Structure formats: structure tokens, C-alpha cells
Amino acid sequence: MTNDNVLLRVEDLVKHFPINQGIIIQRQVGAVHAVDGISFDIHRSETLGLVGESGCGKSTTGRTILQLYRPTSGHVYFDEIDLVNLKGNDLRKMRRRMQMIFQDPYASLNPRMTVGEIIGEPLVVHTISHGKAIERRVAELLELVGLNPAFANRYPHEFSGGQRQRIGVARALALQPDLIVCDEPISALDVSIQAQVVNLLEDLQKQFGLTYLFIAHDLSMVRHISNRVAVMYLGIIVELAEQNELYDNPYHPYTQALLSAVPIPDPSVEDRRRRIILEGDVPSPVNPPSGCRFRTRCKFAKEICSVEKPEWREIQPDHFVACHFAGELG
Amino acid sequence: MGRYIIRRILYLIVVILVVSMITFGLMHAIPGGPFSREKALPEETIKMLEERYHLDDPLWKQYVDYIYNVLIPHFSTTAPTNSLQDDFLVNAKIGNVWFRWMNFGPSFKSRSRTVNDIFRDNLPISAQLGTMALIVALVIGMPLGILAALKQNTPWDYLGMGVAILGVSVPVIVLGPIFVWIFGVELKWLPPTGWGASPPYLLGFLPSELGWEFFRYAIMPSIALGLGSSAIIARLTRATLLQTVREDYIRTARAKGLQERLIITRHALKNSLIPVVTIIGPMFAALVTGTFVTELIFGIPGMGKYFVTSITNRDYPVIMGTILLYAVFLVIANLFVDIIYAYLDPRIRYD
């Protein structure tokens, strides 16, 4: 793959949230290592799935890429422009090209604005269109996401969760962005509506050549929508591969455990299936384990795992993993 | 909205009836009367005075007469007399019929004045002072609260909230004399007492000349009175804004690429102003109907003193008049608050 096919390149991205203590003079006593040095590419018109347990830093990664949180260190190249160095108006202009769909469709829409105002506002602030043209564009967007254009005058509380998430999608599409970060866009929705929204996202991708970073914890949904999948654990990416390769041939013990938890809709297979149960809890991101972060819960852990950070290596073509013993484990 | 406002105004009549009934009952229940003196007046004199003011009538009749005089419009073909018993707040000549409304009666204490005289001469001064104090409170309180919220846990926040605590805890009775002493007596920049406007007033309450001569007198009392309220507004603005800027839709606004200024004004402030607007209503009613201490310290002939002295004097018509005035202001201020709610939160619909 050539380099100009890469839309987004993340290099050694770190986001630490400081923990302060003190009554008058605030001292930093530690930091939550939410994202601790992750690197990956996203190609144009591709969907990269990002999976992991709650609290592993998936959402922080998405928000830090879009500079909604400023990273502690590292670089985010969007079309070869380093977003980390952009400020003020330059950054605002880049926001036209990268948007986000948020997890909670109830809280992420301003309750005091009509749907038309919510969707049309980006057009106004980026001075893309005026007056009647905005109304037309809003109607067009509502239709695109499968809502009645007449709903533009209603308020978010008049809609169901699925409809609200469609409004969020329409809002993200308003500026015709290249990249959309979908931050668990379906986890707040009923199962019956999840498929609708995912299909909508897929249709829109085909129609507009959109690029998605799809953050989720639902593994089967991620497999369905993604071209490649990255697995996160405690602030780092442990494995990244093309979706079928990852699901069929996982190398990292954490990925193996994660995948073994996915139920199979066939009782006879389900009965014979071997589940890997992880012992213990996720360690605190304030004080992550030395060496390999997964070693405290890994049944294959050896001496070296606590001493040396596992190298990020390409074990198969386009299949990356960070484990000392990848390939040697059953 | 129109129907809602009409309904609320009808509801105002109910409020007036209830408030007047309770006030009337309470003020007649307290011992003593308007003509009780340290050295008792002769029995016959008291009898004559009570007869003159109809205080010898049964209580229910006194109340009904009062309500009749205040609430029911009067029509007559004869011109109004100069009698103290015959002083109406609204006098209009339609054709050759006089339309007359709201006779609050004469004051028992100030023998040559009526309650309407107080409303005409003293209330405008209190209203001017109160309005300016509220402006001071908003102009100082809101920016202070916004600054403290946006720069939470920084020296700006501590400074702003420090000033706010000071504003709440130092009452006018301390601040006023300090102001008078520094700026009025020592520096001689501003007149220590008095008020720079006198009747007649434009539209019944605006000073006829709004120049330096007016503000010279108004600056000190307005700031002294407004500072305490500004502290309340600052703290409330800070608290609600802090809550709002953490909402998800603020992050959405940021992701849309809005300027920070627009995020704060259009998304955060508009959503956090409801509690602030809620307290401004009663605050306004309390400030404009007269503030006893401030007016006393700065020698302002407002109507604050009538709230206090009318009760000690058992000046029944003045008690009734001031309390009803306060109730009406409170209801109307709250009506405006409700109308502003609908603007701030379009989900609120009254019809």
C-alpha cells in the first residue's frame, strides 16, 4: 500500500490525565495513563475497528485524535498535517474534515436547540452556506439518514434513541468530512436498532467514501463493519490485523481470551467451545505493570514479561502483535 | 403565550385577594392601633378619629370597603376633589365620564399625605435605585461567575469567589458608611447623602434628567446595594456553568468546530442561565420596592422606610399599600422570569 493512501497516521500517541492533590497549592501526584504510546494508520475509505474492555482508553484515543483532548505527547498526522501542532482557527478549519459520532445520543445533543439548528450549526460556523441553503441541506441530511425532513423543527427529546443517533450521524455528515470517529455509536441503543444504525453507517461509507475509526466493545459488530481491527488493553494496542485474520488467527493471549468470550449462535458448538477465563481485574492505569501490561493476567507470563516491553512486530504480513511469545503459544 | 399571560394576570387578582386578606387580618390582630400613644389621647378624640377613618365599622366591612376602593374601577361625572379620601392612582377622563381606579386611602401618620402620594413621590426613587443596583449586580456578578467557572481552580476562580464571599458577608450597613466616609467625606468626590432626581417623573418613575447630576448621587448607593446581590449571582452563575460545560453536547459543539466564545455563549451560558434568571425575579421585586437600610444610610427619600415605620405606627393603609405593592411586583417579576424561561429553554411551552 502506498503512503498517500493513508488518511490518518497516529504516532506514539500518549494521553495522561494528571492527578492533583493539595488544598491551596496543587501538586501533581500521579497520572492516569489512559493512552500510553499507540501507533497505527487508517487508510482512505477503510474502517478500522478499535476494541477493548471498558476503561482501556478507546474513547480517549478517539477524542485525542480529534484534539478534543490535547495529547501529552506523540503525533497525529491527518493527510500529512500534524494536528497536534495546530491551534485556534487552523484546528477549527481541520474539524470540517474530521467529525465524531458520540456514544450517548441522549446527552450529546443540546436539548435547547432544534434538530435543524443542531445539524445546521456547523454549516453556519464554517460559513459554508446561508439562509435557505442551510434549510435545504438540513432536509437533505435528514433524508439521507432516514428521518423525515419535517422533523427539523423538533427538539431532541421528541425522538427515540435510534432516531437521535441518526441525528448525530446527520450532524457529523453536515460538513462532508473525510474521517468520522464513531465512539461506541451503537452501545447505547437497543439491539434491534443497532443493526439499523450500523447499516446506515455502511451505506454512507459506500456513498461518500468515508473513513471510519469505529470504537466498540461488541466484537461481532466490529467484525461485521471493520476492514482491520486493533485490540487495546490498558492504554496500548496489543494486536492489529485484517478483520478475518484477527478473528480466525489471534496471536495475543488477550485477543484470544476476548474472542473466546463471544458467544456462538449454535448450541452444539457453544457446548464444546473452550472459553478462556481471565483471572483478576484490569490493573490500575495510574500505575500500570512493568514490561508487558497484560502479564498480571496472562497464564503464559514468564520472567521476561515483567522486565521487557514486548516489541511491536509483524508476525504475518499486515498482522502486528505485541507479545514476547506470539506464535509459540497454543 | 398571549393566553398564558392573561391567565397569569387573572391569577394576580387572586394573589392580591389572598395577600390582602392575610395582611389585613394580621395587622388588626396585633395589639395597639394607629392612635395609641405613650400619653393616651382622650377617649372622645380617639372615637372621632376612628369614626373619621371608619375604624369603628366591623372588620369585614372595613375589608370589603378597602377592596372596593382599590380593585373596583369607579366611574363618575363629577371632577375629582382634592380630599385625601378621594385620591385615586388612575384618573382618566373618557368623554365626560371620569374613570378612576385604585384608591389606597390616606396615611394615618402623615396626615396630609395619601398612600398614593407615597407611590407617586417615593416609589420612583426606590425603583430607580433598585434598578441601578440590579444592573450593578448583573454587570459585576455574571462576568465574575463566568470567569470563575471557565478558569476553575485557578487564581481567577479564587479571586472571583473571594470577592463574592466578601460581597455576601459584608452587609450594606457596613459597606454604606465606609463608602460615605471615603468617597463622600474624605475624598469629597460624591455627595454623601441625597438623591439626584425629584418629581415629576417621566412615565411615573424615570428621572426627568438622566445626567451626571443624577448619577453623582446614585453611584454609591447602587454599588453598595448591588454588591451583595452580585455575589449571589456570581456564585450561582459559576455553579450552574460548571455543571453545563461538562455536558456531552458541549463536547459536540467543540467537535463541530465552533469558536470557544460561541461554545460558551450559545451552548453553555444559554443552558445554565435558568437558575440565575429564577433568582433575579424576586431579587428585582425586593430591590425596587425599597430597601430600608440603604435608603437610610444614604439619606434617600425612597419608600423603604414606609415598610418598617408603617408597621410600628399601625398605619393600616400604608401597611396594606406597601405589602400589596410588593406582592404585585413579585408576581409580575416572576411572570417576566417565566417568559424569559421560554426563550432560554424552547422546550418550555405555556399554551
Image (tube, rainbow, N blue to C red):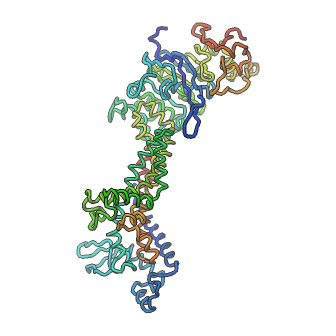
**Relative to A235, residue B133 above or below:** below
Dividing the picture into quarters, in which one does residue B219 lie?
bottom left
**Relative to A289, residue B319 above or below:** below
Most extreme residue toward the right is A272
- Looking at the image, residue A66 sits to the left or right of residue B212; the answer is right
Residue at left offset 60%, top offset 29%? A30
Most extreme residue toward the front is B186
Q: Position of residue B245 (x, y in %)?
A: 48, 39
Judging depth in this view, the residue of B257 and A161 nearest the camera is: B257
Examine the rendering and report whether any part of residue A328 can be seen. yes
**Tally of marks:** 0
Residue at left offset 51%, top offset 33%? A165
Judging depth in this view, the residue of A63 and B183 nearest the camera is: B183
Q: Position of residue A210 (x, y in %)?
A: 46, 20
Q: Position of residue B192 (x, y in %)?
A: 34, 62
Dividing the picture into quarters, in which one does residue B308 lie?
bottom left
Q: Quadrant of the C terminus of chain A?
A: top right
- Looking at the image, residue B164 sits to the left or right of residue A325; the answer is left
Residue at left offset 69%, top offset 16%? A306
Examine the rendering and report whether any part of residue B7 can be seen. no
Most extreme residue toward the left is B95
Dividing the picture into quarters, in which one does residue B283 lie?
bottom left
Q: Where is residue B320 in the image (x, y as percent from the top left)?
A: 43, 73
Judging depth in this view, the residue of B338 and A18 nearest the camera is: A18
